[in-house]
Amino acid sequence: MNFNLFTQFRAAAVLTFCALWMGAAAQAAFTVNSDGTVTDSATGLIWDQCTYGLSGAGCATGTAFHFYTWQSALKAAAMANAANYKSLNDWRLPSVKELESLVKLEAASPSIDGTAFPNTPAASFWSSTVHTPNTAFAWVVDFNYGDANATYQSVPFRVRLVRSGQSFDLLNPVYTVGGAVSGLTGSGLVLKLGTQTAAISANGAYAFATGLAPNTAYAVSVQTQPSSPAQQCTVSNASGSMGAANVTNVNVSCVNAYTVTASAPGAGSGGTLSCSPATVASGRTTTCTATPDIGWQTTSISGCNGTATGAGVNSFTSGPISANCTVTVSYQPIRYAVTGTASPPVGGTVTCPSSPVTHGQTATCTVTTNAGFTLSEVSGCGGTAGSGASYTTGPVTAACAVTASYTAITTFSGTTVPPAGGTPGPASASFTGGGNTCRFDVANTAFIAAPAPPPPGQTLPQGMFKFKLIGCDTTPVTMSVTWPKPVRGYTKYGKASSGAAASSYFAPTALAVSGHTATFTVADGQLGDDDWAVNGSIVDPNGPLETVASAVTPVPTLGEWTLMALGLVLAGLGVGGLGRRKLQ
């Protein structure tokens, strides 16, 4: 057996039974209105007297449109409302049971009250009801025989529009949703239930026109608040589920409402302010939100009986409102501290403006370098890195620091000061150790002449190197000094012990000589540090030492005549000796 056909047959039989059961009472309930509508007092439904497309007396003018698919039939109702058809705008396509209520079985072809609905074609009319077993079908009522059928939604049929009233369903009764309105003094209040609306113009009972079936969820809300005067209406018991009786406790309470004005300098001048709701029921509060521009901060928000906020607070809640009022916000530019940092701290100073810098502005800092250091780089706060005595930041957008990086001076160069008759030459020195801040005090470091005569038999042919290191710790310093001439020996000059009364020459610690360079060690407060004090400072004169060569005594020479006389004497002595040997 075809299930769909069986379902259609069963439904048609039920609907036909309903129409028969309501009988003459329903047929006698029609009232033809002067605006071309028909009211069914049994259901409260108001029908278009004419098939859609026909009009005039006896519905004799026009053409009964028969080209509507089901979707087009639904749109026809929307088009009629948009056109304010018959000065009404709440037309809809009837349900199959509403449409079946028009069937008059004792009439034939068409099966309808011809007095109330003249010139009705003996044909099928679309309903808004979808066929549940097959949603590609929808229900139609055939006014030729008075039966109902489900058919494809793409088939064209005629349309009769309906409005208002309570859905007519004997087998599935519906019930209205309503309640009471109180406190209404304004006009324009509109309530909403699903797709239904109800315009309320006075206090008292109200109900939505179209009922809902049992177990259907409902929710009533205010679609449009009253004006003239402005009011705020709230709904109590607004939602629930339908039972087997009309809902009568969805009450609406209205109170006077007041306007809250948000006052702010505006975007680009500090920021904006918004309050929600802007229309507030009497005795209620509103919440305002400040939105500062970039680089600005909220100073305060106040007004409308609320407690004023402090700086940096962007949210504000009013007090209970009883009149129109204004909430005002004030803004101020954000200012940031720009600080200077030296690395290491003993390397120098960075002095930046003492007053905070306004957001987006620049600042100029002054950089100084302490003795014994060189400035390596200045950077920070978005500026361009450099190594000058003045540094300008980029646009400041947060608290920031300008940092100057310093490097301790560990090399020195100069010209030797040899004894009279010697030739000066270029010389240099460098060291390691003594801690990160140990450095040459350049102003007190130099190549010098010997401060005192060297030991007997020795000389200081290239002069001496007197250095001063500052900022040193007690770790050993390894000093290397390179001279213009080869180094054959080396010496220091100073106090050879902490208790020495006078300075003297003595050998350096860990001396190593290679070519022109002498390397030795010295530590703060130890041998070689001329002040013998642990004070971060090392003073040490030093230089190449050489032995003086021994002097040679010249032998006197004899003159010519002296040599001839001496020769004659020697010759005479020789002759005398020969004569004595012969006498013997």
Image (cartoon, helix red, strand yellow):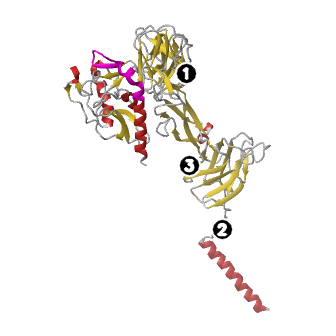
Foreground residue among 508 and 439: 439
Q: Earlier in the sequence, mark 2 or mark 3?
A: 3
Q: Earlier in the sequence, mark 3 or mark 1?
A: 1
Q: Report the residue marked by disc 3.
A: 413
Q: Is residue 141 visible?
A: yes
Q: Nearer the viewer, residue 39 or 503?
A: 39
The answer to whether residue 35 is magenta is: yes
Q: Give the residue pinned by disc 2.
A: 555
Question: Pointer 1: what residue?
Answer: 313
- State which quadrant residue 472 falls in: top right
Q: Earlier in the sequence, mark 1 or mark 2?
A: 1
Q: Are marks 3 and 1 in contact (CB under 8 Å)?
A: no
Is 267 rendered above or below residue 307?
below
Q: CA distance from mark 2 to mark 3?
A: 48 Å
| Callout 3 secondary element | strand
Amino acid identity at mark 3: Ser
Q: Nearer the viewer, residue 541 or 267?
A: 267
Image quarter of residue 337:
top right
Residue range highlighted in magenta: 18-39
Residue 447 horizontal/vertical position (percent): 59, 47
For marks 3 and 1, give the one nearer the viewer: 1
Instruction: Give percent across and percent down for residue 251.
Output: 51, 15
The amino acid type found where label 2 is placed reads Val
Element under disc 2? loop
Residue 459 drawn in magenta: no
Amino acid bearing label 1:
Val
- Eye-nearest disc, 1 or 2: 1
